Amino acid sequence: MTDTTVQPSKRRTHSSLPVIAGSSLAGTAVEWYDFFLYGTASALVFNELFFPKTDPLIGTMLAFATYAVGFVARPVGAAVLGHYGDRRGRRATLIASLLLMGGATFLIALIPPYAMIGAAAPALLVLLRLVQGFALGGEWGGAVLLVSEHGDRSRRAFWACWPNVGPPLGNLMAAGALAVLGAVMSEDAFLDWGWRIAFALSALLVLVGLWLRLYVAESPLWQEAEAAEKAETAVSPRLPAGVVLRDHWRQVVLAAATRFGENAGFYIFSLLVITYVTKMLDLDKSTGLTAVMIGQGVAVVTIPVFAILADRVGRRPVYLAASAATIVWGFAFFALLDTRNTGAIIAAVCGGLLIFAAFSAVIGAFFSELFPTEVRYSGVSLAYNLASVLAGSLAPIIAIALYQRFDTGYAIGAYLSAMGVVSLIASLIAKETRTTDLANVEAPSAPSSPGMPTPQS
């Protein structure tokens, strides 16, 4: 095997938890800025510029369909980048994913509209969206592991939660960038070229994230596993994803299921809501963007608070409470939106993203505690992105189709509540993992019941 041990250099690397957590947060925020910028632009811009003029809702569905393509690529990215993350190290793989994401987002800013190049416009959009999805497939798992594998067991949820602050922070930056651009220029100028500025800014953000990731130390647990293989005291799997699917598929399925309510909810609360407010309620787009920005701010602040709670009471109670809240809020959310009152709309989004924050506080630690070091990158990435494909990618499309069929937001609320039920059942099945030693997680030998992984401690 190629020697991949991190070599000493004149460059100082940091291994303190605050520095590691800050680096992981910065990287995920940049990547999710890129990913969510596409989603927000799908609701506001792409349906106008990159598709033939059709019914407005049909154009929006087509735009969201290209948005969903990115999710299809995420499991592929999880398998490929997860493989390299397990075999070559967490840090180098994270740098590669950041460069891929930033490059694709910058190139989106350069695509001519449908009116100029016809079908080539949506085709290029789909291609670059696939690259985005591939890159994101390997981002979250590595960012979480770089923190959790440095961290202390008693506060693992707190330290591992910081990469999960990246998605709402990235979404906040994306919505904020488009809101500012939309406010300072005319509608025509914004549609013509203004939105492209937000995508071009990705290049600068990537440089910041790259600089931070170059100066953090590699995961000590991964280095120990790598050293053990070289000493022939252990054999690292040649295809980590294959080992995960053979020996740890129960953990993958269970972990993915716990995310259904969180993932579907997040895209409805932060993405679909913009379409709902502008297309269904015929309100100004600034109303939806303002609500999303405030709600994302709430999530950024409260994720660490819920993580502290998860370290004290366990992962499972927080999961159960968030799942139950999703079932209820699915209906309350649209009742508040349908008032057309700005304050009620903001309250609806803030309530939904508060529930998302509770989920996010637990995911990083819980997923890390399910897989052994040698395949942990692949395991957490596959589980995370499986849920994203099955729950998150389809949520906006299903939501719009349900509204077209039933002409009411409550149909979407019923769908969201059903996703909450899936998470609730998975959370009831799951075992508590708070006391898990990450250095001694093994493949389950005899689960106590089908689909239920043996807890490690």
Image (tube, rainbow, N blue to C red):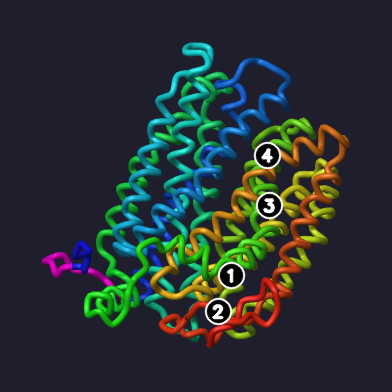
Residue 444 is tagged as 2
Q: Residue at x 44, y 34 (%)?
A: 128
Residue linked to disc 3: 264
- Mark 1 and mark 3 lie on one chain; the one further toward the N terminus is 1
Q: The disc labelled 4 sits on which kind of residue?
A: Ile
- The one nearer the camera, 100 or 192, is 100
Q: Is residue 6 above or below residue 127?
A: below
Q: Is residue 43 above or below residue 190?
A: below
Q: Residues within 10 Å of mark 2 (few under 14, many from 20)?
A: some
Q: Residue at x 21, y 68 (%)?
A: 6
Q: The disc labelled 2 sits on which kind of residue?
A: Pro
- Mark 3 and mark 4 lie on one chain; the one further toward the N terminus is 3
Q: Give the CA distance from mark 2 to mark 1.
A: 9 Å
Determine which quarter of the picture holds residue 287.
Answer: top right
SS label for mark 2? loop
Asked if disc 1 and disc 3 are in contact, CB closer than 8 Å, the reply is no
Q: Nearer the viewer, mark 4 or mark 1?
A: 1
Q: Is residue 321 above or below residue 440?
A: above
Asked if disc 2 and disc 1 are in contact, CB closer than 8 Å, the reply is yes
Asked if disc 3 and disc 2 are in contact, CB closer than 8 Å, the reply is no
Q: Give the CA distance from mark 1 to mark 3.
A: 20 Å
SS label for mark 4? helix
Residue linked to disc 1: 251
SS label for mark 1? helix
- Mark 3 and mark 2 lie on one chain; the one further toward the N terminus is 3
